[in-house]
Amino acid sequence: MPEGAIATKAVMIWINGKAWSVREGSVVSAAMLAAGEPCRKSVSGEPRTALCGMGICFECRAVIDGVSQQRTCQVVCRDGMRVDTQS
């Protein structure tokens, strides 16, 4: 590998029951956006996703490994992680 190059490896996560390969170090909100899956659904059923990208707006909440209300823009993907859209 050339000097200064950054090694990237993939990790496998599950989003709404589907396997997705993402770059190690990616945040969950980016993975969900790439997968075309909403982070949560509003009270009226509208799909919502990350808005601010820094944990302030709480639009990116999802269920991560069975724990609800997780801010996906603040959580780094790890191999085997399970993510589900928050209802």
Image (spheres, rainbow, N blue to C red):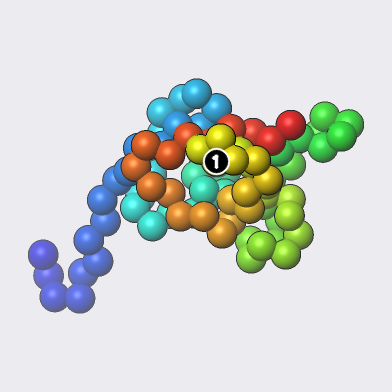
The answer to whether one can see residue 41 in this image is yes
What residue is at 74 percent from the left and 42 percent from the top? 48
What residue is at 51 percent from the left and 32 percent from the top? 15
Left or right side of 9 for 55: right
Query: Circle 1 sits on which residue?
Result: 64
Left or right side of 80 for 68: right
Q: Is residue 54 above or below residue 14?
A: below
Residue 37 vs residue 74, the one in the foreground: 74
Residue 51 vs residue 12, the one in the foreground: 12
Q: Position of residue 37 (x, y in %)?
A: 60, 34
Residue 85 vs residue 35, the one in the foreground: 85
Q: Give the residue type at disc 1.
A: Ile
Task: Report the quarter where the C terminus lies.
Answer: top right
Q: Position of residue 25 (x, y in %)?
A: 38, 57
The answer to whether one can see residue 38 in this image is no
Quarter of the figure with residue 49: top right
Quarter of the figure with residue 73: bottom right
Q: Position of residue 24 (x, y in %)?
A: 34, 52
Task: Name the residue at the right extreme.
Answer: 44
Q: Is residue 5 above or below residue 65?
A: below
Q: Position of residue 63 (x, y in %)?
A: 61, 38
Task: Name the residue at the top extreme.
Answer: 17
What residue is at 22 percent from the left and 61 percent from the top? 7
Task: Name the residue at the front extreme.
Answer: 67
Q: Is residue 77 above or below residue 86?
A: below
